[in-house]
Each structure stands twice: as C-alpha cells, then as structure tokens.
Amino acid sequence: MDLYVSLAPDFDCPPGHPGRPVFDYQPVALADDPVVSVVTACYNCAPLFAETEASVFAQSLQQWEWVIVDDGSTDRETLDILARVQSRDPRVRVLRIEQNQGPAAARNLGVEQSRGRYVFFLDADDLIEPGTLEKLIWHLVSYPEYAFAKGSSTAFGGQEYHATVSFQAGNLFLNRNPVTISVMIQRSVLLEVGGFDVSLVHGLEDWDLWLRLAEHGYLGHGVPEFLDWYRRRRDHSDRWQSWTKEGMSNMRVTLRRRYPHVFRQGIPVRGIRGQLPYEDVPTELPFGNPLKKRKQRLLFIAPWMAMGGADQFNLNFLSQWSARGNEFSVVTTLDRNYPWYSEYTKLTPDVFILPHFLREVDYPRFLDYLLASRGYDVVLVSNSELGYKMLPYLRSRHPGVTYVDYSHMEQIDWNGGGFPRLGVGYQSTLDLNIVASKHLKSWMQDAGANEDQVEVAYIDVDTRRFCPDPDLRQRIRTGMRVSNETSVLIYAGRICAQKQPRVFARVMKELVAAGHNFVCLVLGDGEDRRWLARYIRWNRLGGHVRMLGAVPNAKMKEFLAAGDILFLPSKMEGISLAIYEAMAMGLAIVGADVGGQKELVTSACGTLIERGTPEEEVTRYAEVLAHLIEDHEVRRAMGTSARQRVEAHFTLEQMGDRMCDLLGQARALHDDRPKTVVSQALAREHITLGLEESRLNREIQVFAKYRALESIRWRVQAAANLLTERLRLRSCVALGSRLLRPIKDSLWVLGHRIKVALGLARNWG
C-alpha cells in the first residue's frame, strides 16, 4: 500500500470533529520565551475562525504564542471574537492594522512582534493536526541544514484532495506555487531575507518568499504526513486577482526578473543527510514542553502499524487502556508498513512515526523529550528491536518510569529467538516481561529469564464483534455461490514460509483428488502468494481454492461467518489471532501444534498436528480435514465448543483487565525491587552501538539489493547475448539457404537419378 494512501485523513473528520480522540494537552507552566510563534493574518474571518482557534489550542506542543494580526477588519463579529480569544489565554496577542493592507504586511508585523525561535504561518480559516508544531520543529532541529519545513496538505471545503507536494519539488516552484502557507520557518532567517513583499497585495506573496529564500541559499524540506488542512473555494480568483491564468503568468515573469540566479541555476534539492559511522548521539533537549497529567499515561513503542495479529493485539490493548480512562502515545521506529495508521489515530492523536521527521541518531533524545513532556507512568515495548536497544538510555534518564515489554512468539530463525530473546537479554532494564502464552514463558525461562519477572497475558478476542451470525453466513455464501452442503475452509494469514503454503497446497490437492465437497478461501497476501496462485492454476484446483488476497480486518468476520473450518498449518506461532477469531465465530480448528496453541485449542474445539516432515504433515492434515468435511455433526460440535471456550476464558475485556493488572504489578515491582540504573555515559555508549548496528544493517540490505540487481542484470545481459547470437545464426542460416539452394537442388536431382539407376540395375539383374 502506498504510504500516503494509508496516512491520508478522512475528509469528513477534520481536526476538532467530535469523532476525533483527544489528549489532555495542557501546559504545566508557560515559558517566558515561547518555542514557536503562530502568526495569523485575519480580515473579517468570523464565520470560520473558531475552528482554527480550536486546532491551535489542541496542539501537542504547548509552548507557543499566537500572534493574530487584525488587518483592518470591519465586521463586528470578527472584532468580538478576537477580543474573546485574546482574553482567553495570555499566549494570544491581537495586533491591529487600522486599514487593510493585505496578508503580506499583516504577517510581517506579526513576525516583527513575535518572540519565538520559530514562526509558523496559519491562515485564519485553515486547520492543523494536533502534532503539527511539535513534528515540524523537531524536523528542523534534527535537520539544521534546512531553514523551513511543512507537511502535506488536505484540501477541504469547496474542493477535496490530498496534496503531497512539498519543498522537495525543487524546480516545480519556478513554474507555480504548489504548497500552502502553513510552513514552519526559523525566525532569524525570515528576518534576514526581509519577510513578505508588501507590494503583493493580490496573492502569491508566499511564492515570492520561497524563491527569495532559495536565492539567499536557504532550502526547505517536507514531513511526509498530512499536517495542515487548507480550506478551498471553488475558485480563489474571486478574492485574489493574481490567481487568474493571466496573473500567474505575469507573476512568473516578475519572479524571473527578481531572482535570476534561481531561474538560471535551478532550485537545488538536497538529499537527507545519512548517519555517520559512530555518530555522536545528542542528549541536550532543544526545548521543554511539560504537560499537565490527570490520568495514567503509557508510551507504546512498536516498529510499524501493519496488518496482522500482533498489531491487532496492540490496537485491542490500547483500546482497552483508553476505555479505562487512561491516555497513551504511540511511537514507531521503521519507515514502512503503515496500512493500519488510521486505526491508531482513531484512539489517540499522539502518534509519532520517528523516521518521518527525525534522523535515527535523534530518536533517543526525542523519546527523552517525550518522557519529560508527558510524564508517562509506563513505557511498553512490543516487537521493536530499536525500542529494546534504547531501554538502558531511557532508564538512565528517567529511572522513575516503569518499563515493560510484550512478546508474541519465539523466532529461532531470526536473531537466535527474535524478540523474546531480546526480552531475556534486556530483563535487567525491564520491570516485567509480558508474553502471549505459557509456552513462551517456559521458552524464556530456558533461555535464562528470571521466572518471577515473566507473566502471561493472552491476546484474546472481541467476542461481541466476532460471534456466529446465521443471516450473515447465508448472505455471504449466497454471494459466493456456495451451497449449504459444501464445507468452507478458511486459510488466513500472511502467505509466507511461516504459514507453510506449500504444505497447504499439497493438502488441497489431496482433498480434491479424493473428491471431497469443499471450497477453501485463501485470505491474505505475501511473498509466496504468486507461487501459490501458480500451483492452484497448474493443478486445476481453482474450482475448490479461491484466492481473495489481503482482506481488511472489517471483512474478516464476513468470511469467517461463511466458514466451517479454519486450516492453519503454521511452521511457528505464538497463538494465532486467526484461531481466536475463528473459534469466536464457531469454526472448528485444524492447525499446527506449535507455540502455545494447545493452550487455546483443546481436542473438543479442533485438532492440532505435531510438526513432522512435509510429507507426514500433508498426510495427517488431509486425513483430519477429510473427516471434518464429511462429518458435519462433529464439525458443528467442535465449533460450538470453540465458541464456548473463548467466551469463558479469552474475551477482550479479560485481556484488558489482565494487562492493566500486570502494568500495576510492574509498577509495584519497580518500587519493591528497583533495578540497577547504568550511568548515562554507559547508556549513551550502548545506544551509540545500537544505532551503529542499525546503520550497518541498512547498508547490508542495500548491498544485498545491489547484488540481487547485479545478478538480475547479468542474467538479462546473458539472455540478451543469447538472443542476439540466435538471431545472428538465424540470419546466417537464412543467407546460407539462399546461396546454397541451387547446389542443394542439384544434389537432390543427382540423388534421385542415382536412385532410379539403381532400380533399373536391380531389374536387369
């Protein structure tokens, strides 16, 4: 999925919408010198200004001042609103220009009177996402080579679209102005270049400023998230004369005359500065942002926001945590895999994808800043390798916070055991390890973990959402043209080596060959999907096996409702979320006896097969499935037992209670058995080594991709050479045929004559 598609906000849910989650962003105290000055030019803006006001006060960075310049408003309602806003908060200042002079003059006055190190421009009818100021300032802190920055824009109102163009567009700015005014800029730079041109009273004064900054050698950059909401009219030219086709053309001529160097040399596009070997990890915080706290707060560190069982547990747990009146922030450490981004932002506005606005070397101090700002009670790490490596540093800076991790399953083929192994290794920096099964607890104990510090919390399932639905079952089956007598199997998950698609495919072939009446729905995508599709096609299994691709979680319930048996021959699992959901929907289970799955699936609910050779597994799975396909009563009894079991022991509410109890237990352990805190110098050295390992891993991956591309290039080149040789030989043969045809014909005639002569000789004899 394209990154921007997954991050795009819903047009119907702008900042301030009642459906948006809230976080209690209230400053503990106001600094004498604000970090940023929000500058807004206002002219008769009454009807829409309240929405803009709400988006400013809802910012996660609260160390701001808001300089509103009233550019000669004549509307009484506007004047009353501005007076009210100024009296609401001492951070708001309203300046007045008696006669309307245009936005350029108003903004310049606001900049002159501002006190912040940074200036953020916000029009009086536009909106900003809660994290806008915080992310843009940190982006400029992390990349000081840039003087200004902005996020992507969501247009709303008269027109709706998502605009992803930013200052990386380079020479596109020579032809038009592709960005909105909602830009964060260093105040000193703005003053140096003279601010906006006050003579440009009909619009496009911001286009002029971007090119003047480039002429002075200052460049901007973009954060790949939708941060500002730009209110569109059907046609802006009714208000701004320069927005006509003729006005744009005239402006282009003016800019070419004003900034000849930029138009001659072009606008350079500076690449992101890479991490240097053993680069120093900065520890000084650029500014503070202490926020009041009235609820328990949790910082959740994860790698991404992917579609899968682990992320579904994350969402379920965070939803349960929030439902109990608590707050949380989410931090992710990788720059890919965010199809469920919107699912997280439905629960909290405090979401930070670190690679979007920070260099990796700045991750530790940003987390240090967050801990100081939000006053978290607990930090929870789940499946983030870098999250583990930052633990000693964070604990050295904030020893009073409780640190916990959550592990789903061991992965012997990755890092000697995967994240549970990291949980064992970092146990001295964690107050509690939480795992998804008793099996995993035993595995960690065998790996050297302290038994008293490992607790089990099953991931569980929402039994109110996932429950048998006869009407839905009939509707989905009818839509798929599947009769009630046909058994429906479900194979769900990422189609990769872990789920053993080759074993699955051979089992399907066995069942089809035996003549069983069934249909199997393959729900998922992955690196082995193309192989599986080819196997199904080549073996003519398409009448029984239907590949439906990746299925949104919202649709999973529909297919499970139509199903009878979940078939999951995994190589390894913790306890599969798909099994939890299938049991809640009343399906019988056929799967692998791996991880902690026997803790969920009893013999009354289904059958788990021990691992063996692929041939052994294929035979045993085929036998079990054949029996359940034919014996509907046994299958239904298993489904009923499965539903009863999850209702009794594995509901979402039980998981929420268990997790909250364990986090409370972790707090008690933190107080009763305090951990040794390493020195800040040693912690800094540790994270330096961790970041260096991360950098080397990235370079190895790039090298591996290069080698793979080189291999492909050589194969293509060899194929091209072979094709060229064949074409050359064919050409030679064709030429030889034309030259030798007369000789060939003569030899044929001669041979025929000899044959006739020999026949005559035999007759004479």
Image (cartoon, grey):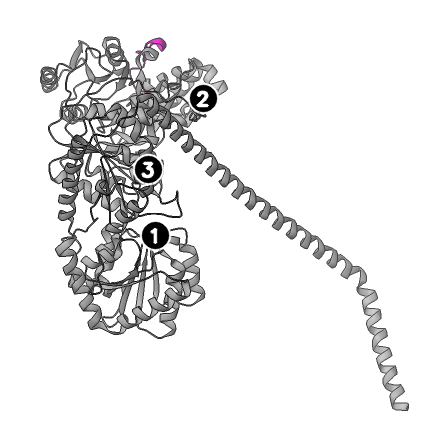
As helix, strand or loop, the secondary structure at mark 1 comes to loop
Q: Could you tell me if residue 567 is visible in this image? A: no
Which circle's residue, 3 or 1, is located before the other in the chain?
3
Q: Quadrant of the N terminus?
A: top left
Q: Please say if the residues under marks 2 and 1 sit with CB atoms less than 8 Å apart.
A: no
| Amino acid type for the residue under numbered disc 2 | Ile
Q: Quadrant of residue 760?
A: bottom right
For image coordinates 22% across by 65% down, the residue present is 603
Indicate the position of residue 268 as horizontal and vertical percent values.
46, 22
For image coordinates 26% across by 19% down, the residue present is 121
For image coordinates 38% across by 31% down, the residue present is 690
Indicate the position of residue 54 as horizontal and vertical percent values.
15, 26
Q: Quadrant of residue 430?
A: top left
Q: What range is drawn magenta here?
A: 191-204
Residue bearing the label numbered 2: 267
Image vertical order of residue 273 relative to residue 30, above or below:
below
| Amino acid type for the residue under numbered disc 3 | Gly
Residue bearing the label numbered 1: 494
Residue bearing the label numbered 3: 425
Q: Is residue 193 magenta?
A: yes
**For residue 757, which numbered disc appears in the image?**
none
Count of number-bearing discs: 3
Label 2: how many Cα within 10 Å (few below 14, some 14–19, many 20+):
many
